[in-house]
Structure formats: C-alpha cells, structure tokens
Amino acid sequence: MMPMEANLMALTWDSIADGIIATDTQGVIMDINTAALELIDIEWHEAVNQPLDKILSLHDETTDISLNGFWEKTLKEGKKVNLPRNTKLLGRNQDYYLAAKFSPIQRLGQPPQGVVVVFRDITQQKMHEEQLHLYRMALEQSPFSVVMTDIDNQIVYVNREFIELTGYGMEEVMGRDPGFLKSGSTPEKTYQRMWETITRDDVWQGEFYNRKKNGRYYWEKAIVAPITSPGGIINYYLAIKEDVTDQKAMEEELRRTREQADRNLKKSQYYMEQLENARRAANAANKAKSEFLANMSHEIRTPLNGIIGMIELTAATDLTREQQDNLDIIRICGNNLFSVINNVLDFSKIESGKMEIDRVDFDVQEWFMQSLLVHQAQATKKGIDLVAVLDPHIPNCLLGDAKLLQQVMNNLIGNAVKFTETGCVKVTMDYEGEEGGILWVKIQVKDTGMGIPKDELPRLFRSFTQLDGSITRRFGGTGLGLAISRQLVEMMDGTIRAASVEGEGSTFTVTLPFEQAMQQVDSLPENERSFMAASDIGQKWTILVVEDDPINQTVIRSLLKLKGYQIHCANDGKEAVSAWESLRPDLILMDIQMPAMDGIQATGAIREREKGQPSRTPIIALTAHAIHGDRERFLASGMDEYVSKPVEMDRLYHAINRLLDPPEEVGLKPLKQKRYTEPNNYLPVEAEQLMAKAVEGFIPDMFSLLDRLHQQLFEEDVDQIERLAHQVKNRAVTVGELDIKNQAFKIELAARKHALQDARSAYNALKQSFESYVSFAGQQMENIREGGK
Amino acid sequence: MIKILIAEDDLGSRKFMQQFLKAYGECDMTVDGIETVDAFLLAWDEGEPYDLLCLDIMMPKLDGLKTLKIIRDLENDKHIPAEERVKIVMTTALNEQQTVYDAFDLGCEAFAAKPINQEKLREVLHNLGFDPIE
C-alpha cells in the first residue's frame, strides 16, 4: 500500500475531529493535532515537547484522583488502554468529560516507538447519559409499578416495584404477555375496554384484580398510555400501576359500616313506629280504662241504689218479725256491698291514676263534725265513748279535698269503732304550724280496742291484707280501706302512721298540709247549721224530682214522701221546665244525666226564666259521676248544691234542709262546743286502766257487765245479750275462770238462737259462779294485805 | 231431737243454715274455730254431745280444716267408736280440689259448696240419717 502523501497526511491529521496526541517513549509530546489543541485550549508551541501528563490533565471524577501514566502502561503492556468512565480533562477554561484511548505506536514485532492517545469530548453524551439515567431511575425506583409492552403486548421493561409487588423476577417476565398476572376475577370487559381505548391512542384508567407469584391476590389501579414514535405511530404501551389493596379494604370497610348504619337507622325507624303504635295503644287503653271506670261506676252503683232504696221502702212497711229480721240482714249485706264496691272502685281509680285531688275551700268544723257524726250511732250502740277535740288554732276554712279527707276519716274512725269493744275512741285535730304558706294539721284517731300485733304493723297499709283472713270474715271489709287511706293521704302530700299495743289499743296519726283558704268564711250562724239529720220536718214543702230512671224516681219519691214532703216528678229536662212553670215547687232535685234535655240545660232554662223575679228555686243536682270540677260546674250553671248517687238519704235530707228554711234543731246536742273545751266525759287514762288484768279491775268490770246483761235479758235485746256475754267470756278467760267462761259462752249461744229462757238460766248460773269467785278473791286480797303489813 | 252445731262466721250464711236446719233439730251457732271446739267440748262434758256439725272452712281464729282435725283427734283420744262420732258436713265458698281432698282425708262425711243447694243438702243429710222432724 502506498502511504498517503505527506501533506495529505498532515491535513488529515489536523482534520480529524478527535484529539490526537503522539508521544515518544518518554511520554513527551511529539505532535498534537488541532482538535486536541482546541479541546485543551493551548497553542502548538505550548504543548509540543511537554510531558503528556502535564498537558493532558486527567482527573477521575469518581475517585477524585489525577490520572497519569497511562502512556507508560500502554508502552509496558504493549496494548491499548481505555480510560475509566468518569475521566475528566481539566482544561484551561472548562472541564470536559473525556473518552480516550491510548495505543502504542509500533510495528508488528518491533518495540514501540511511542504512544498515541486519541480522545474526544463526551460531555454532551455524558449529559445525555445522565439524563437517561435519571429517567431510568425515575421509572426504576418509582413507587408505582411500571410495565412497558410493545405492540405485540410483550413486556419490554418492568421496574423494581413491579418485581417486588408481583414477586416475579425480571428474567421471568421479559418478553411475556402480562396476562399471567390475571386472577380471573377482573371482568373481560375491562380488558376489552382498555384495549379499545389505548389502541385509539387514548389513555385508559381502571382497576385490575391480579395475582402475585405466591398466589396472593391484590387490587391495582392502573393508567395505561400508548407511547408513540415521532411519526405518531404507537410502538409501546406504558402501564403505571398502584397497589390499592389496602385502600380497597378500607373502602369495603366503609361501605359495610355505612350499610350497617343504614340498617340501624331503619331499625330505629321501625322501633319509633312501634313505639308510636304502643303509645297510641296505651292512650287508647287508658281512655278505655277511664271510660270503663266511669261506666262501671255508674252501672254498679245504679242497681245498688235501687236495692238499698227498696230495702228502706220495704222496711217502712208492715212486716212480720221474721221479715224484719231478714230485711235487717239484707240491709247489712247491702251496706257492706256498697262500701266494698266503693272501696274497689276507689282503689281501681287510684291505681289507674284517675283519682284527682280537689282544691276547694271547706269549713273545718263542719267537716270534722260530719266525720264523727256518722259513727256516733254505732259507738253508742257498742257502749263506747266517741270523743272529739278540735284545736281552736286551726283556721275556720282550709283549702283541700274535703270529700277524700272524709273518706280517710271514715275509714280510720270506722275501724277504731269496729275494733273496740269497751272504752273510747278519741279523735283529735291539732294545728302543727305554718311553713311557707302551708298549714300543717295533725289528725289522730286513738282507740282502746284490740290493738294490732307488732309483726303485723308493717303490712297494715298494704292492699289486700287484713291481719288474718279471718278478720275479713269477722269484721267485714275488703282489706282495701287502709291501703286506700294511705294512698289518698300520700296523694295529698301527707303522712299516715300507726302505733299499737296488742290488747290495749291503737293510734293512727295523719299529718297533712293544707293551703290557706281563698276566703275565710265565718262559721255560719247557728240557725243555718243543722249537721244532724232532722228527724221530722212536719212542714209541707213541694219538691220537684227530675229523674229519668223510673226506679230511682220511685225510690226518691217514696222516701221523701215519708218525710212529709209533697212530691212531683218529671222524666227529663223539658218536662222539668214546664213542671216548674206550673208548679213553682219549693225545691228541685235535678238528675244530671237525662235524655232530651239534661239537668244542666234545664237548670239554665229555669234560671233564665227566673230573671227579674224575686224568688229563686233551690236546685240540688243528683249525679252518678262525681268527678273533679263537677261541683264548680254545677254551681256555675245555677245549681245550689249537689248530691252524688247512689243517694245517701241522710245527705239528701241535710241538703234539702239547708236549702229550705229549717226549723229549730232537733236531735243530739251540738258537738261544736267541744271546739273550745275538753269534754268532761273524756277518759284517756282510765281507758287504759280498764285493760288492767288485775283482779281489782276484773271484779268491778264484771259487776258492771253483769248488771247490763241483766238489763238486756229483761229488754230481750238478743244482740246486746250476745255481745255482753261475749265480753264476759273474754274477761273470764283473762283471769282463768273457766266456769264463768263456759256459762257466758252458753248465754252467747242461747242469745244467738233467740233462746231467752236458756240465756236467763245460764245467766243465773253465771251470777252464782261470779259471786263465789268474788268472795274467794276478797279473801285472797285480805290475806295479801295482811301479809304485807 | 238431735243437736246440731253450726260453725259459720258470715251472718247471712249462718241465718240461712239455721233456718234450714231448725227443721232437723236444736241448733247452736258458733262464729269461729275456737268457739266451735269449746262448744263441742262443753256439750260433751255435759253428756249431750252434738249429732251434726256444719263446719265452714273459712273462719277466724281457727279455720274449718284445723277445727275438723282437732275434733277428730279428741274423739280418737277418747276412743269414741265410729258410729258415735259427730257427723261433720263442711261448707265453703271456695272451690279448691285440694281443700276437698284434705277435708275428706281428715274425716268429714260430706262437703257442700256455697251457695248451698237445698235439695242437695237435704239429700246429703238424709244419707247421713238425718231427716226433718214433721
């Protein structure tokens, strides 16, 4: 081969774009080309004959050391040497990244004559490389899993995250179709849609449910984008995916929670509905209960009224002794039934919360006396004293429910009288003081009766208990009396207590608060107060009885006629008004519940017609319903008074008396004197002493009892005889006198069968036994006294 | 003339029994269990025991069943032969099977539920050997 012409060679030498430096075997630069000079930025004369290392300042950026002596290496080893990657040429003004090759200048087989180094500035390249590296790192280290596939859907690249996530190694996935990730649960449609989207050069977003190499499943959110060449042709697909398994779990959790909340909401709505239904049902039931109570009250009381009325009527006719006796029993049964029914109805009323407490002014004295009067007769019959003491410090009038209070008093005083055979029942009403506008009053009922056993005291006020079932049979009653009293007292914000000593007596104490009365009415002047039923009127008054029930009409008419009144009747409100027009009666008894025109309307009509006239006919309302506010209602509509049905005749007479001009008082002496002074026949302490079991107590008692027994045997009152004989028997037992006891028992039995002769002979035997006992006892006492001296 | 003891605490029932039974003999009336036992013993001590006892179950102090037991025990103690024992008819307003069984166990002859059916009572008394005196 002909060598190039020397000039051409030189030209070529300087035209080469890479830098060339040739050195001798000592590393001294023999020649350097233009490119090299430009790169290093020196002149030819500055470089030639200089050591290579001086001119070509090389620096390894990685290790940060200067690089030299490569020419030596080349010479020694006799072969080409490449410079390390990050070699930098430290130029005068700039540094360049360099790629350089050292080669020995030598002919084959001959020793080298020098070194030639060829180098080029690769800074640009390096920069690009760096940039590329950056991109690579971005993809590689992305927290997202990156997969690149070609148009044949074969994987050309996956990043580290992909590997970590799926568990597949690089070698396992390269060149494969990414379908191996499918779990089978992602619907085909998803993939279809994805392909449709990306093949038309759009970006697709969606979710896959995939499977890792270890079989675990995971959710990933993916964005798949087509990569186009500059020409616009899609040549790759880039999928960037995120593991959203946890998120999905949370979403599911949230969804479930929301569903639960929804369900709970529905449940509570349902419950609300149920509650509403129950409430409505309860209200309806409650209303039904009230109506039932009211109806029952009426339905039961009406025929009872008939029975009791008829009893009275029959009693007033001519009867044989036997009929009289039988009727007495019917009367007792009727009265018992009446009070039992009242107790039960009251109890029902209280239990269903329908009992209401009135707040009305009432005259204390009148109320107090009324409460006692009712029991006077029975007390007298039993031979026990009924004593009343009213504290003068109590105001004339108080605000409260007089009717319910009277019921309580009735129960307590009634019990006291019922369970006491000898001695007295003392009723006191004391003023306890005022506190914040409330007046406290203490009412005590103290008796010298049989007392209550200590262990029974706690059960006393509970419903349905009487001390033993036998008491019910012996004394009558439902066992509700005290329970009702307690409930009433407590409804009135008071307290009720019992204290008792068995065999000596009991004390019931009721403490109640009252409000000041609206107006204090002075005690009505005497001639207007007849709280005793006047036994005989004598005057001919005309009374119009307005009542739609024929039996009630008959009963009231007959009973009033007996009292000497002249009676006319009307069957309803309309008739009442016309009867009043023609008759001008002295008084009207007006039933409230009537057909056509009721009592209130009739009263209104009459009052209307009376306007401008001087006189005013007194009208008394008769009603089976006595509910809260009725009294005011009646009074407001023009009535003067009201009496509840079934009619207690005493009450009716009293009311009639009050409204018509009453004559001077007849009957028992007025008890109101007791307001200011203690009565002088009041035996508190002596009553106790009567119970003494000492012989010295027994003998005087017996004398007195036997005396009375003798009298009763003469008067032939079998009931009294039985009662007295019973007492004698009990006293005899307390001192262990069996003979006396047996004889007294015989008198009792005889009295029960009305065998007076037998009773008398038993009495004689008894007297004898007693007399021998007295002399024996007298002897004993003598001996004791003698002994004590 | 037979002697009858009526043990009944309710006035109405007592009156009724007395009215009904006075046709059969002399009637004594007691109002509780204790009186009944007392009357029973008293009659016995005087040598004129009762032939018939109408015993109410619900009575104060001592109820009918206990009274029944006491009377039968007393008769046992005295070794009274069966045909000479007082004939006892229990009466009650209650209607409990157990009570009826107990009464029969204790030794009563018959049982009459209140309100008492007169026809039935007549029949029962007849079966016990009691008939109204003409």
Image: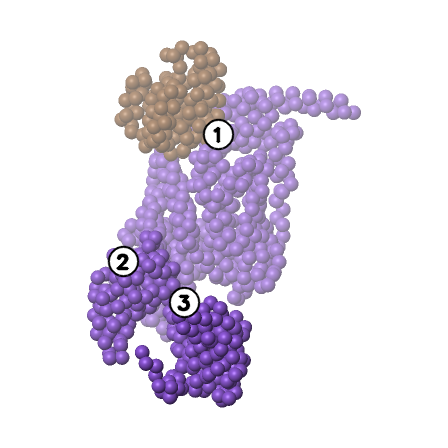
Chain colours: A purple, B brown
Query: To which residue does mark 1 refer?
Result: B61
Please state the chain letter of the residue tagged with numbered disc 3 in the rendered image: A
Which of labels 2 and 1 is toward the front? 2
The numbered dot on residue A613 is none
Please state the chain letter of the residue tagged with numbered disc 2 in the rendered image: A
The type of residue carrying mark 2 is Phe
The residue furthest right is A789
Residue A362: percent from left, percent from top: 50, 60
Specify few, some or many for label 3: CA neighbours under 10 Å numbering under 14, 14-19, or 20 or more: some
> Marks 2/3: CA distance?
23 Å
Question: Above or below — where is A311 with respect to A591?
Answer: above
Residue A717: percent from left, percent from top: 46, 33
Residue A361: percent from left, percent from top: 50, 62
Residue A539 quadrant:
bottom left
The numbered dot on residue A141 is 3
Specify few, some or many for label 2: CA neighbours under 10 Å numbering under 14, 14-19, or 20 or more: few
Count the marks: how many?
3
The answer to whether the residue labelled 2 contacts the one labelled 3, judged by CB atoms less than 8 Å apart, is: no
- Taking the spot 61% from the left edge, 34% from the top edge, the residue there is A691
Residue A685 quadrant:
top right
- Taking the spot 51% from the left edge, 29% from the top edge, the residue there is A725
Quadrant containing the C terminus of chain A in the rendered view? top right
